Image (cartoon, helix red, strand yellow):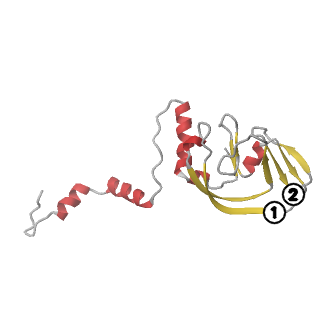
Amino acid sequence: VGICGGYQMLGRRIEDDGVEDRVGTLPGLDLLSVETRFAAYEKTTRQSERAACPVGPILSRMGTVAGYEIHMGETVRDPGVLPAFGDDGSVSDDGLVIGTYLHGLFQNPSAVDGLLSYLHERRRLPYEPVADDDPYHRLAVLVAENVDLDGLLGLALESADGAFVV
């Protein structure tokens, strides 16, 4: 998984017209059929929520994710190359190489679960999904783990004469 500059490096090459560095072309890792070009100074910044492309063993487990983009350059996919999230990024034919401009991807529990459940499955290891990121859920877990609920219930049921009702 390559995010932002990591995504750009997963492609065939990066061309720079002198925006980021000196003029020239650098080879990429050629793991994704994309090319990036830095031309006129234009920075993209935006918040977004996107559905993962339902292909391959990783993205098909992710669902909808949220994050933000902040990058320079334009990355162009070869014809037939699928985007990873909505109209963003790219995914290899086997679904094992993913590139995106979506920062904050792994702050989404569904993205973490998608990747980790695949890796655990490949290694035939058990996997427990990450906890729900809902703050009320986290509070409920903390209370359940750290409060004697039976004792608390007993105090709540105490009768007026001081005797506990069970």
The answer to whether marks 1 and 2 mark residues whose Cβ atoms lie closer than 8 Å is: yes
Residue type marked 2: Ala
Residue 39 - label: 2
**Relative horizontal placement of residue 134, taking residue 15 as reference (left or right):** left
| Most distant residue in the top direction | 124
Residue 68 - label: none
**Relative horizontal placement of residue 93, taking residue 158 as reference (left or right):** right
Q: In the image, residue 116 lies at what x, y percent? A: 54, 41
Label 1 crowd (10 A; few <14 / some 14-19 / many >=20): few
Q: Residue 146 is drawn in which quadrant?
A: bottom left
Residue pictured at 49% horizontal, 32% vertical: 125
Residue pictured at 69% horizontal, 35% vertical: 93
Label 2 crowd (10 A; few <14 / some 14-19 / many >=20): some
Residue pictured at 36% horizontal, 57% vertical: 140
Q: In the image, residue 64 lies at what x, y percent? A: 56, 51
Q: Regarding mark 1 in the picture, which secondary structure is present there?
A: loop
Q: Regarding mark 2 in the picture, which secondary structure is present there?
A: loop
- 160 w.r.t. 147: above or below: below
**Relative horizontal placement of residue 49, taking residue 144 as reference (left or right):** right
Residue type marked 1: Glu
**Quadrant (top left, top right, bottom left, bottom right) of the C terminus:** bottom left
| Most distant residue in the right direction | 23
Q: In the image, residue 81 lies at what x, y percent? A: 73, 41
Q: Which residue is mark 1?
A: 42
How far apart in space, not on screen, are marks 1 and 2 (Cα)? Answer: 8 Å
